[in-house]
Amino acid sequence: MTENGTGLGRLRGKSAVVTGAAKGIGRATAELFAREGARLVVNDVDEAGLEDLRARLVSDGVEVEAVVGDVSVVEDARRIIAAAVESFGRLDVLVANAGVIPLNNVVDATPEDWDHVMAVDGRGMFLTCKFAVEAMLETGGGSIVCLSSISGLAGQKEQSTYGPAKFVASGITKHLAVEWADRGIRVNAVAPGTITTEAVAALPEEYKAPMKEAHPIGRLGEPVEVANAILFLASDEASFITGAILPVDGGYLAQ
């Protein structure tokens, strides 16, 4: 960021899709991408939150389309990606961020809990990546950034459904990176620690307090700190990076 709050133009002219953009990391990413010159398609199931974001971006002069939809539904996922191609002629960047964060142990979790988180966090990421790759192949490449988690690289308590879904995110990242590197498509992921999103704010304090102590840096992360890492991986500054899973976790995984 420059001193006046404008970006450095690292995504100037690029067409980007951010899923799960109404709040938290997705919103911080969309706002940062806008400041860096991206033309945006923002998506969420939260229509009111998405419209608030769209209106704010439009008022700042950003080219933006909002698509309400569920990434786990094939036609919705297809529409989200198609909106970028239809509005801007191409897709350069996908941030596959949409997800749910349930807390449950394997005794308390139900098969329905498993199916729900795998539908959104797993199937939804697969679908948006699939349609993004198809679009990027038409125009010579692009960059995909998936949202994994420390729970997608290491075991944690109370993560019997969410954690495995984030291992899916880590796996999609590595496999797609190898599969499409020779076609100009880079696929990376960020693995956030515990971040002060609206979803985390709603969690019980008895869960959050120990998590602060578990991060060597001594605090929880902020959404914009993850967004900055996403921006780097999405941009041409990371042109020789693919298949990486970048922890943004205050040292959690270094222990």
Image (cartoon, grey):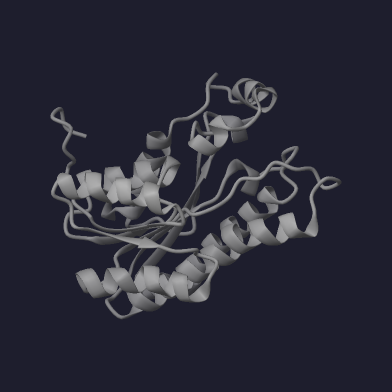
Left or right position of 253 against 36: right
Establish if 202 lies above or below 92: above
Is 112 in front, or is 145?
112
What residue occupies the far bottom of the structure in this picture?
A: 138
Q: Position of residue 65 (x, y in %)?
A: 27, 61
Q: Is residue 36 visible?
A: no
Which residue is pictured at 55% across the width and 66% down the height?
72
Name the residue at the right extreme.
107
Vertical side of 185 occupied by 154: above or below: above
Q: Quadrant of the C terminus?
A: top right
152 vs 182, left or right, is right
Q: How many marks?
A: 0
Q: Nearer the viewer, residue 155 or 102?
A: 102
Q: Quadrant of residue 84?
A: bottom left
Quadrant in the picture for residue 108? top right
Q: Residue at x 42, y 74 (%)?
A: 78
Q: Residue at the spot x=42%, y=36% of the render?
A: 223
Q: Quadrant of residue 85?
A: bottom left
Q: Quadrant of the N terminus?
A: top left
Q: Residue at x 55, y 50 (%)?
A: 148
In the image: residue 64, left or right of residue 23: left
Query: In this rendering, would 139 be left or right of 247?
Result: left
Q: Find the residue positioned furthest to the front.
A: 48
